[in-house]
Image: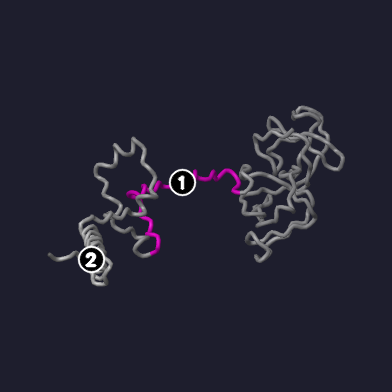
Amino acid sequence: MAEPRDRDAPGHRRMVNSMLKAMVLGVALIGLASGAWAQTVRPKPRPVPVAATLAPVPSERAETAETEETPEATDLPLTATEATGAPPASLPAGPPAPRTAAAAPPPRDPNKGAVTNLPLPRFVSLKSGEGNARRGPGLSHRIDWVFTRVGMPLKITAEHGHWRRVEDAEGLGGWVHYALLSGVRSVMVADDMATFYSRPDTASLAAFQAERGVVARIISCKDGWCRVSVDNQRGWAPVSSLWGVGADEVID
């Protein structure tokens, strides 16, 4: 009958060590196999677009109106700015609005001055003792006439800038600078010899007489008569005997 082997023998220990190594190697192989299986079988998580995580949550009203036919952010085509880096040219929102024709200015009244809007023709007087009447409205135009009587009446017939076209009792004149003219009214005796009365009535007493070309300062005019002053003498004369005032003009 055989006797049992001693467990402490060297051969027994080698056998036990070999079994332990085999077990450890088996466990390691099983772990590697399970890890590979998990890596091949487990699905990879789907990456979430960054734009979706940063986009604001639309309101309830916006979701119901726009989400049904709005493609995802990853499917949208690139804009002109994203593709080229430059802003797109602005396009008109629609057809251009019809251009409205500018209203034509009302025609100018030929009976009023283009500069002062005062009546034309109108009478003024010469302010200085010398006034150059030029062929055109400007210092570059030649001088045609020279007025030398202070206070003589002149008739303005046109305006241009600072210049006025004037004429005297004989119809002679030209363009004179407005600074040479005065609004103080005067008349010139048109008759060979005019009689001035104490009242606006030919039946009244005669105050004095004056010959053609005498300049008188107007005091007042009404009802076809003018009261004037000549060398400190005053009297009334009919407008028909004077030049430098309108037939129905009233001057106070």
Query: Is 243 or 10 nearer to us in this picture?
Result: 10
Mark 2 closeness class: few <14, some 14–19, many ≥20 residues within 10 Å? few
Is 153 drawn above or below residue 145 in the view shown? above
Task: Find out whether residue 86 is within the magenta segment.
Answer: yes
> Which SS does the magenta portion mostly show?
loop
Counting labels gives 2
| Magenta range | 85-114
Q: Nearer the viewer, mark 1 or mark 2?
A: 2
Q: Position of residue 236 (x, y in %)?
A: 77, 34
Disc number placed over residue 19 in the picture, else none: 2
Mark 1 closeness class: few <14, some 14–19, many ≥20 residues within 10 Å? few
Q: Quadrant of the C terminus?
A: top right
Residue type at mark 2 is Met
Q: Which residue, as the protein is rendered here, is positioned at the far front?
A: 1
Disc number placed over residue 43 in the picture, else none: none
Q: Position of residue 67 (x, y in %)?
A: 28, 42
Q: Find numbered disc 1 in the image and state the secondary structure of the residue it sits on.
A: loop
Q: Is residue 50 visible?
A: yes
Q: Position of residue 149 (x, y in %)?
A: 78, 53
Query: How far is the residue under mark 1 from the one under mark 2?
Result: 117 Å
Residue type at mark 1 is Ala
Query: Is 91 or 160 nearer to us in this picture?
Result: 91
Q: Position of residue 181 (x, y in %)?
A: 73, 50
Choose the circle earlier in sequence order: 1 or 2. 2
Q: Is residue 167 left or right of residue 198?
A: left
Is 12 drawn above or below residue 221 in the view shown? below
